[in-house]
Image (cartoon, rainbow, N blue to C red):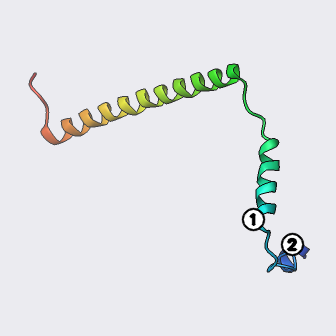
Amino acid sequence: MSDSKAVRGSRGGNADKRTSLPTFYRQVVAELRKVVYPTQEQLVTYFIVVMVFVIAMMAIVAAMDLGFGRLVFAIFTGPSNT
């Protein structure tokens, strides 16, 4: 193992100093200003991609549920004559 200061040392030294509420609020607002929001075109594209994925997963899970259900029903009820 390496002898890193991150592993050996304490956490920043002055752990009991806390940020005041106004300072925290200003930092949150400053971080939110850095956020890049998607355009309407990107939003529609992402929505369609997510919906297609969710519908595909629903179809796969439904097919597996139907298949396993029929398999279990066939195992526990025996062969059917119909």
Q: Secondary structure at mark 1?
A: helix
Quarter of the picture containing the C terminus is top left
- In the rendered structure, find residue 75 and report the number of the disc placed on it: none
How busy is the neighbourhood of tag 2: few (under 14 within 10 Å), some, or many (20 plus)?
A: few
Q: Amino acid at mark 1?
A: Leu
In front: mark 2 or mark 1?
1
On the image, the x and y values in percent for residue 7 come to 84, 75
Q: Secondary structure at mark 2?
A: helix
How busy is the neighbourhood of tag 1: few (under 14 within 10 Å), some, or many (20 plus)?
A: few
- Quickly name the residue at label 2: 6
On the image, the x and y values in percent for residue 81 come to 8, 25
Q: Residue at x 26, y 36 (%)?
A: 69
Q: Is residue 64 left or right of residue 56?
A: left
Q: Is residue 68 left or right of residue 31?
A: left
Q: Nearer the viewer, residue 14 or 65?
A: 14
Q: Residue at x 58, y 22 (%)?
A: 48
On the image, the x and y values in percent for residue 42 come to 69, 23
Q: Nearer the viewer, residue 47 or 53?
A: 47
Q: Amino acid at mark 2?
A: Ala
- Quickly name the residue at label 1: 21
Q: Residue at x 40, y 33 (%)?
A: 61
Q: Is residue 25 above or below residue 69?
A: below
Q: Nearer the viewer, residue 48 or 43?
A: 43
Quarter of the picture containing the N terminus is bottom right
- Quadrant housing residue 66: top left
Alpha carbon of mark 2 to alpha carbon of mark 1: how far? 29 Å
Q: Residue at x 16, y 42 (%)?
A: 76
Q: Is residue 78 above or below residue 45?
A: below
- Quadrant housing residue 22: bottom right
Q: Is residue 82 above or below residue 10?
A: above
